[in-house]
């Protein structure tokens, strides 16, 4: 039993079965196979629009590649100070963009607000040679604090960015969890709200290793440049059909949202249980499958004695993450251990 991260969970059996089925006969290489074509068609249905995409096997690669076709090396990306691209990708966005600057901004619960973005846009002008002009706004959904940007907030922020000529990128490593929690249309939360590129992650949602960079119509003309960068980065896998097979099974009959909804429900159960433990408070709203709790030392000691590992976050709280396989009894065991 682990609440350290959703990446500690095994791959879903249906996705492994799909990979096994893909392991028969010959298929075209480098993403030109029939499975990849079917996934693209399915994603066009899900997002109700034309789109292009490339597959990768890590969220870091997806984010860095996406930003590399949106942001020139002499420009900047505006993001939250807690954003994964800023805190957890070891300079990959800067490396892939050829030196673009990341400008981190503050905001409660790892979310940006309109006032903060407006101030940043004013602080970093386009016409002053000594400053780095922003070219991209990057939003994480879910955020690094487990909170969600709803449609209205995405639309507001993206509208402000695009009015200034910025492209909009969304880090969707847990996009399925955000979508399941908000119960909105995928199109409304992305391109209709002004998002140009989505890094869509399946790995945290039940895949073995499957991520995608989705280009919506506003930037589909950058597919050629994206493929060049995908190749140079070593993410144009010869046998891409195995990545595509994971996506096909993940998306099949709404499985991606069912798995995310289950993880979210387990997080809600966990948050409710911990809120009843003396001395425990929640550090952030629970909008998806992550719970951030302030744990007194006594509770920390109890969890350690029970063999339950938790991860301390930068704000001093402890992050507990549920996944597609988390059981109600696992959650209850943690809560009972916390109570002592």
Image (tube, helix red, strand yellow):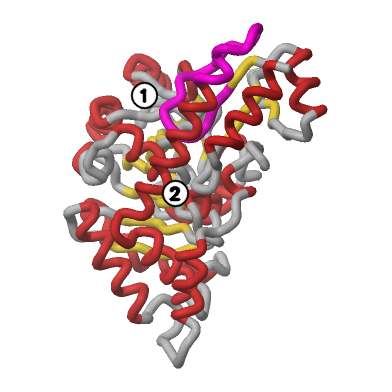
Element on which disc 2 rests: helix
Q: Nearer the viewer, residue 187 or 136?
A: 187
Q: Is residue 40 visible?
A: yes
Look at the picture and state if 88 lies above or below 31.
above
197 to the left or right of 187: right
Task: Using a 10 Å C-alpha cutoff, classify the residue at mark 2 as few (fewer than 14 neighbours), some (14 to 19) or many (20 or more).
Answer: many
- The answer to whether residue 130 shows anywhere in this view is no
Residue 44 marker: none
- Mark 2 or mark 1, which is nearer the start of the sequence? 2
Q: Nearer the viewer, mark 1 or mark 2?
A: 2
Residue 274 part of the magenta-drawn span: yes
Which residue occupies 51% across, 54% down? Answer: 203
Q: Residue at x 66, y 41 (%)?
A: 2
Which of these two is toward me, 190 or 218? Answer: 190
Relative height, residue 172 to residue 266 (above, below): below
For label 1, the crowd category at 10 Å Cα-Cα, with few meaning under 14, some 14 to 19 and many 20 or more, is: some
**294 sits to left or right of 286:** right
Identified at 49% across, 47% down, the residue is 324
Task: Residue 67: give its label.
Answer: 2
Residue at image mark 1: 121
Which quadrant is home to the C terminus? top right
In this picture, is 128 found above or below 235? above
Q: Is residue 242 magenta?
A: no
Q: Position of residue 231 (x, y in %)?
A: 50, 71
For the residues labelled 1 and 2, the Cα–Cα distance comes to 18 Å
Q: Is residue 124 above or below residue 28?
A: above
What span is in magenta? 272-292
């Amino acid at each position: 039993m682990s609440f350290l991260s959703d990446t500690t969970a095994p791959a879903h059996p249906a996705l492994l079965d799909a990979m096994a089925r893909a392991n028969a006969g010959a298929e075209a290489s480098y993403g030109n196979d029939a499975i990849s074509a079917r996934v693209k068609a399915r994603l066009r249905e899900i997002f109700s629009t034309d789109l292009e995409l490339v597959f990768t096997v890590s969220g870091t690669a997806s984010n860095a590649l996406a930003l590399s076709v949106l942001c020139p090396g002499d420009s900047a990306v505006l993001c939250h100070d807690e954003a994964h691209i800023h805190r957890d990708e070891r300079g990959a966005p800067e490396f892939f963009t050829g030196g673009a600057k990341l400008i981190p901004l503050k905001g409660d619960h790892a979310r940006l607000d309109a006032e903060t973005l407006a101030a940043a846009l004013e602080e970093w002008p386009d016409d002053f040679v000594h400053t780095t002009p922003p070219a991209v706004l990057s939003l994480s959904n879910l955020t690094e604090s487990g909170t969600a940007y709803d449609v209205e907030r995405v639309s507001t922020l993206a509208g402000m960015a695009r009015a200034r000529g910025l492209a909009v990128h969304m880090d969707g490593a847990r996009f399925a969890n955000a979508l399941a929690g908000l119960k909105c249309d995928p199109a409304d939360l992305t391109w209709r709200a002004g998002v140009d590129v989505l890094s869509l992650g399946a790995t945290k949602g039940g895949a073995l290793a499957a991520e995608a960079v989705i280009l919506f119509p506003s930037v589909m003309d950058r597919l050629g440049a994206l493929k060049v960068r995908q190749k140079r980065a070593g993410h144009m896998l010869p046998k891409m059909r195995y990545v595509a097979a994971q996506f096909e099974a993940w998306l099949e009959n709404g499985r991606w949202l069912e798995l995310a909804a289950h993880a979210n429900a387990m997080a809600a159960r966990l948050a409710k249980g911990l809120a009843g433990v003396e001395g425990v408070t929640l550090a952030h709203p629970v909008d998806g499958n992550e719970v951030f709790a302030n744990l007194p030392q006594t509770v920390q000691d109890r969890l350690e004695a029970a063999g339950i590992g938790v991860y301390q976050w930068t704000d001093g709280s402890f992050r507990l993450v549920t996944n597609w396989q988390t059981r109600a009894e696992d959650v209850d065991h943690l809560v009972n251990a916390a109570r002592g």
